Image (spheres, helix red, strand yellow):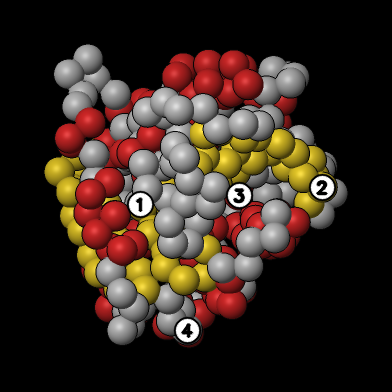
């Protein structure tokens, strides 16, 4: 593809053979830049989501100055299902394989919600690939959310899934019948969620930015505990709900403004020299 002179990032997309998946990815480059500045930034979506439903509002902001790689994980969006249960560890390994297939051996990572938990697993399982990580509303322990969350997960049904997420899936998935599969796999993973051991969290040496909203599903106490356990971490608690700080699709309102997103804080963190 030839780069066009516009104010929008140059865009590529494709599929890669990854551990039994045909894994979908998108690459964004700043206008006139072949590789972007610094490390690529890998965006990892949350449960029940696609690239666009989580990151559509912030990709153009990030891509003004750096290369962006956004992925869709097993059974989500345009990536197929391999008839195995979802695990955060497998998602982490899938992303590591995808990046190697793309000849990328070092990157920064921003994961939102379930994607934040996957980002933790990337930092634990593939530390050699990680420079900096941003954990957006990431869960590491069952006590990181209110008890009623787990009751809701046990009773989760597709009809209760937010309509915006259903629509986002159907807009891109080759087979919309996969919506039920995605829902059921995500729900089962959360019902069976087990705490990430303290020693694994403490083993993370990457510079880390932890973000939650002050009305988030993730409790402030959980974010603070992660901050204490990850030695080179910073913590930001931002006004708003789960994903509102990036314009996640279920949080968008008619008066939502680009200036409300947390991208400048993330950029400052990513641009900071590692000590």
Mark 4–mark 3 distance (CA, rounded to whole Å): 24 Å
Mark 2–mark 1 distance (CA, rounded to whole Å): 29 Å
Mark nearer the N terminus (2 vs 3): 2
Could you tell me which residue is drawn at 33 percent across and 62 percent down? 270
Residue assigned mark 1: 137
Residue assigned mark 4: 203
Viewer-nearest of discs 1 and 3: 1
**Compared with residue 138, is residue 50 higher up or lower down, i.e. above or below?**
above
Q: In this view, does 148 lie to the left or right of 158?
A: left
The answer to whether residue 270 shows anywhere in this view is: yes
Mark nearer the N terminus (2 vs 1): 2
Contact between marks 4 and 3 (CB within 8 A): the answer is no
Q: In this view, does 20 lie to the left or right of 153?
A: right
Mark 2–mark 3 distance (CA, rounded to whole Å): 23 Å
Could you tell me which residue is drawn at 18 percent across and 36 percent down? 260
Image quadrant where residue 90 sits: bottom right
* In the foreground, 223 or 95: 95
Per the image, label 3 sits on a secondary structure element best described as helix
Mark nearer the N terminus (4 vs 3): 3
Viewer-nearest of discs 2 and 3: 2
Q: Residues within 10 Å of mark 2 (few under 14, many from 20)?
A: few
Quarter of the figure that contains the N terminus: top right
């Amino acid at each position: 593809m030839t780069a066009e002179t516009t104010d929008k990032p140059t865009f590529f997309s494709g599929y890669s053979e990854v551990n039994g998946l045909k894994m979908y990815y998108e690459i964004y480059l700043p206008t006139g830049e072949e590789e972007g500045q610094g490390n690529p930034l890998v965006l990892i979506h949350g449960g029940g989501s696609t690239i666009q439903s989580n990151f559509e509002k912030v990709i153009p902001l990030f891509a003004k100055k750096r290369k962006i790689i956004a992925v869709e994980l097993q059974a989500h969006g345009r990536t197929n299902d391999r008839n195995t249960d979802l695990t955060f560890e497998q998602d982490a390994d899938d992303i590591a394989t995808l990046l190697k297939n793309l000849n990328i051996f070092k990157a920064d990572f921003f994961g939102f919600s379930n994607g934040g938990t996957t980002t933790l697993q990337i930092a634990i399982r593939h530390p050699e690939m990680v420079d900096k990580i941003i954990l957006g509303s990431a869960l590491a322990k069952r006590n990181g959310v209110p008890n009623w969350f787990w009751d809701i997960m046990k009773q989760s049904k597709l009809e209760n899934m937010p309509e915006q997420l259903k629509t986002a899936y159907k807009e891109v998935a080759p087979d919309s019948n996969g919506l039920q599969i995605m829902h059921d796999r995500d729900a089962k993973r959360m019902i069976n969620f087990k705490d990430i051991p303290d020693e694994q969290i403490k083993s993370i040496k990457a510079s880390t930015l932890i973000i939650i909203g002050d009305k988030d599903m993730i409790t402030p106490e959980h974010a603070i505990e992660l901050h204490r356990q990850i030695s080179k971490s910073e913590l930001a608690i931002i006004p708003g709900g789960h994903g509102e700080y990036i314009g996640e699709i279920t949080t968008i309102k008619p008066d939502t403004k680009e200036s409300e997103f947390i991208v400048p804080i993330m950029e400052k963190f990513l641009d900071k020299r590692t000590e």
